[in-house]
Amino acid sequence: MAPPLAASAALLLCLGSAAAVWPQPQHLSQGSASGGCCLSASRFRFAYAEGSAVAPGCDVLDEAFRRYWELLFPAAGRRDRGNDRSEDSPCDVLNVKVTKPGCSGFPSLDSSEIYQLTLSEKEMLLTADTVWGALRGLETFSQLAWEDDVGTHYVNKTDVVDFPRFPHRGLLLDTSRHYLPLKAIVKMLDAMAYNKFNVFHWHIVDDQSFPFESTVFPELSQKGAYNPFTHVYTPMDVKRVLDHARLRGIRVIPEFDTPGHTQSWGPGVPGLLTPCYAGSKPSGSYGPVNPILNTTYTFMSALFAEISAVFPDFYIHLGGDEVDFSCWKSNPDIQTFMHQMGFGQDYTKLESFYIQRLLDIVSAYGKGYVVWQEVFDNAVKVKPDTIIHVWKQNSGRYPNETAWVTKAGYRAVLSAPWYLNWISYGQDWLEIYEVEPLAFKGSAEQKALVIGGEACMWGEYVDATNLSPRLWPRASAVAERLWSNKTVRNRLDAYARLADFRCTLLRRGIRAEPLFTGYCDHEFDGV
Ligand SMILES: *[C@@H]1O[C@H](CO)[C@@H](O)[C@H](O)[C@H]1NC(C)=O
Ligand SMILES: *[C@@H]1O[C@H](CO)[C@@H](O)[C@H](O)[C@H]1NC(C)=O
Ligand SMILES: *[C@@H]1O[C@H](CO)[C@@H](O)[C@H](O)[C@H]1NC(C)=O
Ligand SMILES: *[C@@H]1O[C@H](CO)[C@@H](O)[C@H](O)[C@H]1NC(C)=O
């Protein structure tokens, strides 16, 4: 573990880092101190550039313009909002030009996020291939703007060409171990956008509770949620999350983990879980999903038909981790089935049998899937476009897993070093920051199969009281690792920019914990 950074790094902050952008753009240049713009709340506005393929009425940009105006001028009243056109100068407008048409859809793994910012007193222009890239550029612009001691806003002469290193930059939230109110989820989506994260991995159900309100199987949440009225996500709630995420260029990948991690499913669907035996009699407790019954697959077909329709992303996360075989082993019907199928005593074969059928069901709905690494480890036959989620820390040997997964030709998403629910005293963001996702033995083709990573926030000890400070700015370290050039890893520079960015997060109402000693101009004043 790296030694804590000394207080000297904190001093760098006070020297005025107007160009502190987090995550660090691929190319950013700022000329001499002259040639920037003074931004006036009464005159400044965002506009669609002439020749832009996307025009006013595009909700993604219309609403982003509104949000970012308020972030730029937090103290200004709405009435001031760029309405004074009396002396229009190039410094009064950030023109936004999107070259490819399209605003109504959802972002996807293939969406371009490249953008270019040209800021000077002669012209302020943001160009991007897509609206999603334009969102990233607006975020950068908002971070480049700074305020002096008397409250005047500036943006220095700057040129930025920027794009993400990895296309999949995710955050996992667990809403089963503890219920997270909609407000908390929505706020984390805001913080994700500030960090240029683009995937919300919604680990929505698990053993402890089933808060997803299914319209096809309402009993799942009626009997499986902590409280079927107050601790559920209704179809409207889910739609709000999807809309809020889309407007920020964030994909939502839901996870319905089976066959393990399903205790909460049991009460709502009699016969779904395997009855465990004590000797020759059922013990009264239940294990993983019962893989030997046809009714199991009929149920899964109907449930995943609904899930596939509700969540627009191409990918669904199907879990497949940590299946405990002891209950299956105790059950005589399962033993008979194992014998009939010629599985011997190898229960991974039974798990594979289940997962195989589930994957076939989900692909029939035209969906792709992400699975935890055990599915690959157990040699389940999966479609070539499957994404394997590497999560086992394995004493630091997870790069081996990434090597094996990519050697087999599958794409990989990395989470093993980024379980942020684990905490310790000191600056553990450094360890998170210094991970290099491609540091494994493998060919260039293999490296190209690593599409990104996810910071995970498992919920055993986390609810809305401590979610935000535990996540931020530690998850920001992951955000930069996944966005910026791999050569961006100078600790002192990162410390200064991250401490500054953390103050930005506070200013924006995100409860982000401190990295070390110091202060922010605008301290968090929530109680
Ligand atoms: C931005 O411009 C101001 C003066 O307009 C200057 O004092 C400051 O050093 C500049 N910042 C950077 C990072 O160039
Ligand atoms: C389960 O389905 C299979 C294949 O569709 C069929 O051969 C078998 O008879 C069914 N089993 C029962 C118990 O219905
Ligand atoms: C697995 O990891 C160990 C330790 O990092 C390394 O020595 C070994 O070469 C790796 N094996 C493979 C197959 O990559
Ligand atoms: C990352 O930075 C290195 C060193 O500055 C540079 O050679 C490389 O081209 C950069 N990568 C990209 C994708 O721009």
Image (cartoon, rainbow, N blue to C red):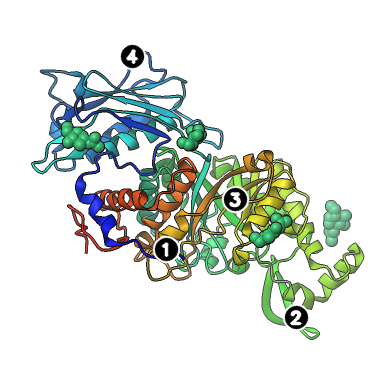
Q: Position of residue 413 (x, y in %)?
A: 59, 49
Q: Which residue is mark 1?
A: 428
Q: Which residue is mark 4?
A: 50
Q: Which residue is mark 2?
A: 277
Earlier along the polypeptide chain: callout 2 or callout 3? 2
User: Is the residue marked 2 within 8 Å of ligand 2, measured from its CB?
Assistant: no
Residue drawn at x 52%, y 57% is: 204
Which is more toward the observer, 166 or 10? Answer: 10
Tell me the quarter of the picture where residue 63 sits: top left
Q: Which residue is mark 3?
A: 439
Q: In whole angstroms, how far apart are the C-alphas of marks 1 and 4?
A: 47 Å
Residue drawn at x 24%, y 50% is: 13
Earlier along the polypeptide chain: callout 3 or callout 1? 1
Q: Amino acid at mark 1?
A: Asp
Q: Position of residue 438 (x, y in %)?
A: 59, 47
Residue drawn at x 52%, y 64% is: 222
Please tell me whether mark 3 sits on a helix, a strand or a loop: loop
Q: In whole angstroms, how far apart are the C-alphas of marks 2 and 3?
A: 46 Å
Q: Amino acid at mark 2?
A: Tyr
Mark in front: 2 vs 4: 4
Tell me the quarter of the picture where residue 384 sits: top right
Mark in front: 1 vs 4: 1
Q: Amino acid at mark 3?
A: Ala
Q: Position of residue 182 (x, y in %)?
A: 39, 55
Task: Tell me how many marks there are.
Answer: 4
Please tell me whether mark 4 sits on a helix, a strand or a loop: loop
Specify few, some or many for label 2: CA neighbours under 10 Å numbering under 14, 14-19, or 20 or more. many
Image side of residue 403 versus residue 221, left or right: right
- Above or below, 483 relative to 522: above
Image side of residue 406 versus residue 199, left or right: right
Please tell me whether mark 1 sits on a helix, a strand or a loop: loop
